[in-house]
Image (tube, helix red, strand yellow):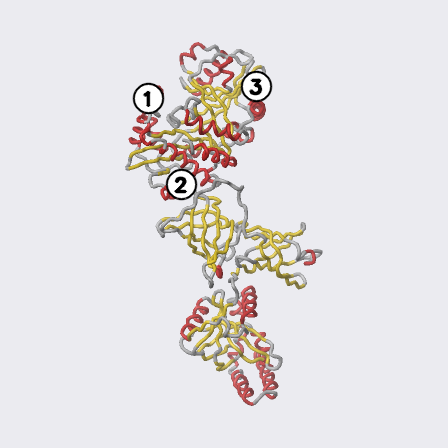
């Protein structure tokens, strides 16, 4: 009965209107009435078809399409219109059908000339005739008899295509047309709006939070829909003041930023807001004077990513690239990148040959004038994280782009490397005498170290025609600290090779320091004062910066404790105790160090109470087939702390001076601890670790001199905080002008 009633309502509505119209109009409407007198079967299908149509288009899509129409539907077709052939119209319509989307049908009221826009789903179009099914039957039944068909609109990206086909017939289910020879492409807006999928929106202003969803967006504006519950009302939102917007889904937060309200529309407990970000550039990290160098490489890679708001895949060309970020180019009309937006699943694709996965954030958006008719958008993205193996490959590629003889973590000919170490005098006779008994183990260590372990080791080589000219290495030996060591260069290459590998390390620090996976808060180096080059590089930098909280130098007495000394050492007296270190004792060490030096050493060496129980690094070494162990002991007299010893054990040759395989002794009470007690303690530790000999680093060096302890050399530990790297590089640039 419902179907029959609807048909009768529509029937009499048309009769009433037809009597008031011209004869030709009445004839046109009689055709429509006759169509509605079809068999009862089509009428019964009305509700089912309505249900099917509702699954094809969301309420959000309706809002977007209606807004689309209001701006362009009734513009003069001669303005900015591009002719579209019938064949093109057919192809566009079939694409709409393929995507299960809709056309827009525009009508005008016969008496008042007011517009009416209805949605219709096109059937496959094979010739001149177009058949569409109704989407909104309620509007069609109640309002359409009073309206005359004007034109149809085909959504086409950021444009609309308008056509004025001949109306053939209408019924309760369908409307049929004969397509014209041409349609017209009408620009609907400068920037395309993109519909969003299940993105939650939170708007915050003056300590009040409003929740809703992100409806659509472009690169300059966002449309959100909010709901409120009493006692909150939309009056609590001041449209003249900025708001903070947070956009997220179940997987995480993708955008936060300050916005201003452009437009708003509210009704009872529902409101729609158009927001524009206040800033189109964000400061993701602290400003750096010395930044990663950008390169334009050929072929240039593409970025490919699922957009966090739309879940659609986008593919954009990279303009330039560094180890810490890159810039891309967008078309203004179809821009999708919003400054501040995080892209958690981004792929750098190099000619479909290899890919790097990463997490990135859009940090700026700039308009580039391409010509008089079009604009291009340049967006900068900062790398937030990347797999460490992929990142070292990326950085290695970029270093090669700058200098084809510069290599990072390449497959080294180890025989050539050992020849290089001996040839340059890096391994001098006394050092070789110290390591020669372990030479087989040292070779195995280097085979593992120089294979594929960039998460704990990096090497930098300057090489020409297979001959190594310069070498420098870094190892991550503490949780967030990398140690620079094994710097050597052939004299035949002058200063160039040695400076180039030093520059490589500097560039890696700028490229990689902000990558979480690298774990770089500090970089350190040991050097001897009599070695002129590192003294000027590292010692000179600390002196120039003149702030131990940014860059510090601490001195150790270095010597070997072995059997000969052990045999002469007395046992510890009864009032002395050697026991595992407790966190409160590290707190006392911190107070002592702050008093005598106030530098960065304890933080860099994980000797603070808050890092005491954290050791994730040893497991990484184990996975790489390498050894790293740390043990902490406290030497106390009558319960009072006198010294703390760190027992650091690693593979032979990890550092060729055994600076990673030694005992570090920190004396906090220089008056009570005699040389004899120190020797007794060292002998007890040798027994615990089952070693007959070990290198000792004694701090402070003044203690060794006061106690007349004979040491072989003095090592200075240089520490620089990553946040202060600008000042180090500023000094280095100034120095290298004169070297």
Q: Mark 2 — residue?
A: 392
**Position in image of residue 357 (x %, y %):** 43, 47
Q: At 56% across and 15% down in the image, what residue appears?
A: 637
* Image depth: mark 2 or mark 1 in front: 2
What distance separates the C-alpha of mark 2 from that of mark 3? 44 Å
Q: Measuring from the top left, give residue 60's x and y in whole percent.
A: 56, 64
Mark nearest the camera among 2 and 3 is 2
**Side of 154 where 461 appears, left or right:** left
Query: Which residue is labeled 1 in the image?
Result: 436
Q: What residue is at 39 percent from the left and 36 percent from the top? A: 453
Residue that numbered label 3 is attached to: 641
Q: Give how far across and how far down residue 386 sits, in percent.
A: 45, 44
Vertical placement of 308 versus 451: above or below?
below
Question: Which numbered circle lies on residue 652?
Answer: none
Secondary structure beneath disc 3?
Answer: strand
The crowd level at tag 1 (other Cα within 10 Å; few <14, some 14-19, many 20+) is few
For residue 315, what is the image quadrant?
bottom left
Give left or right: position of 530 versus 273. left
**Classed neighbour count for the residue bearing mark 2: other residues with Cα under 10 Å, few (<14), some (14–19), many (≥20):** many
Viewer-proximal residue among 8 and 470 = 470
Which numbered disc, 2 or 1, marks the residue that appears first in the sequence?
2
Relative to 166, 657 lies left or right: left
120 up-or-down from 636: above or below:
below
Q: Earlier in the sequence, mark 3 or mark 1?
A: 1
In primary-sequence order, the first of circles 2 and 3 is 2
Residue at x 29% of width, y 28% of height: 419
């Amino acid at each position: 009965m419902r179907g029959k009633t609807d048909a009768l309502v529509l029937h009499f509505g048309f009769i009433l209107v037809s009597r008031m119209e011209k004869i030709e109009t009445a004839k046109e409407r009689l055709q429509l009435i006759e169509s509605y007198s079809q068999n009862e079967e089509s009428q019964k299908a009305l509700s089912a078809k309505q249900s099917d149509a509702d699954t094809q288009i969301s309420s959000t899509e309706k809002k977007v399409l209606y807004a689309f129409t209001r701006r362009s539907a009734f513009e003069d077709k001669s303005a900015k219109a591009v002719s579209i052939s019938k064949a093109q119209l057919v192809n566009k319509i079939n694409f709409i059908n393929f995507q299960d989307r809709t056309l827009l049908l525009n009508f005008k009221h016969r008496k008042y000339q007011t517009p009416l826009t209805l949605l219709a789903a096109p059937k496959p179009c094979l010739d001149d005739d177009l058949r569409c099914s109704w989407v909104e039957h309620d509007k069609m039944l109640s309002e359409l008899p009073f309206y005359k068909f004007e034109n149809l609109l085909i959504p086409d990206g950021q444009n609309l295509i308008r056509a004025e086909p001949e109306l053939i017939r209408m019924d309760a289910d369908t409307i049929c047309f004969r397509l014209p020879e041409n349609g017209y492409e009408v620009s609907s807006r400068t920037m395309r709006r993109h519909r969003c999928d299940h993105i939650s929106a939170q708007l915050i202003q003056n300590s009040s939070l409003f929740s809703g969803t992100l409806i659509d967006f472009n690169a300059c504006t966002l449309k959100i829909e909010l709901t409120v519950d009493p006692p909150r009302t939309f009056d609590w939102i001041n449209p003249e003041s900025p708001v903070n917007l947070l956009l997220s889904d179940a997987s995480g937060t993708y955008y936060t930023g300050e916005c201003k309200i452009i437009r708003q529309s509210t009704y009872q407990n529902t409101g729609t807001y158009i927001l524009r970000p206040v800033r189109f550039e964000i400061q993701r990290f602290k400003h750096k004077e010395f930044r990663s160098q950008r390169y334009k490489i050929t072929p240039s890679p593409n970025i490919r990513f699922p957009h966090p708001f739309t879940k659609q895949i986008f593919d954009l060309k990279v303009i330039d690239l560094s180890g810490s970020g890159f810039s891309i180019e967008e078309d203004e009309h179809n821009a999708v990148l919003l400054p501040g937006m995080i892209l958690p699943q981004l792929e750098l694709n190099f000619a479909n040959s290899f890919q790097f996965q990463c997490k990135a954030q859009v940090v700026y958006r700039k308009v580039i004038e391409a010509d008089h008719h079009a604009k291009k958008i340049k967006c900068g993205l900062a790398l937030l994280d990347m797999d460490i193996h992929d990142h070292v490959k990326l950085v290695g590629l970029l270093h090669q782009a700058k200098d084809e003889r510069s290599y990072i973590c390449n497959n080294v000919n180890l025989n050539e490397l050992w020849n290089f170490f001996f040839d340059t005098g890096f391994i001098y006779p006394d050092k070789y005498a110290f390591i020669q008994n372990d030479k087989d183990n040292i070779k195995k260590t280097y085979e593992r170290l120089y294979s594929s372990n960039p998460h704990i080791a990096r090497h930098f080589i300057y090489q020409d025609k297979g001959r190594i000219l310069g070498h420098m290495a870094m190892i991550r030996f503490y949780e967030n600290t990398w140690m620079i060591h094994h710097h050597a260069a052939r004299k035949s290459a002058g200063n160039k090779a040695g400076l180039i590998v030093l520059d490589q390390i500097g560039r890696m620090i700028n490229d990689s320091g902000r990558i979480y996976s690298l774990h770089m808060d500090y970089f350190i180096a040991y050097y001897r004062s009599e070695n002129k080059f590192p003294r000027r590089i590292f010692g000179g930098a600390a002196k120039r910066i003149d702030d131990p909280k940014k860059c510090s130098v601490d001195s150790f007495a270095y010597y070997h404790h072995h059997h000969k000394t052990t045999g002469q050492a007395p046992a510890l007296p009864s009032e002395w105790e050697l026991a595992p270190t407790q966190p409160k004792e590290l707190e006392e060490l911190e107070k002592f160090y702050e008093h005598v030096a106030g530098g960065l050493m304890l933080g860099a060496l994980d000797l603070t109470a808050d890092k005491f129980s954290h050791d994730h690094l040893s497991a990484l070494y184990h996975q790489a087939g390498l050894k790293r162990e740390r043990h902490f002991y406290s030497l106390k007299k009558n319960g009072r702390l006198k010294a703390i010893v760190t027992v650091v054990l690693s593979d032979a040759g990890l550092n060729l001076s055994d600076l990673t395989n030694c005992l570090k002794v920190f004396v906090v009470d220089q008056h009570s601890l005699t040389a004899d007690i120190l020797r007794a303690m060292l002998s007890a530790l040798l027994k615990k670790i089952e070693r007959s000999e070990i290198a000792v680093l004694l701090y402070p060096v003044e203690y060794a001199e006061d106690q007349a302890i004979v040491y072989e050399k003095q090592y200075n530990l240089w520490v620089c905080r990553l946040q202060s790297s600008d000042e180090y590089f500023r000094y280095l640039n100034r120095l290298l002008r004169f070297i």
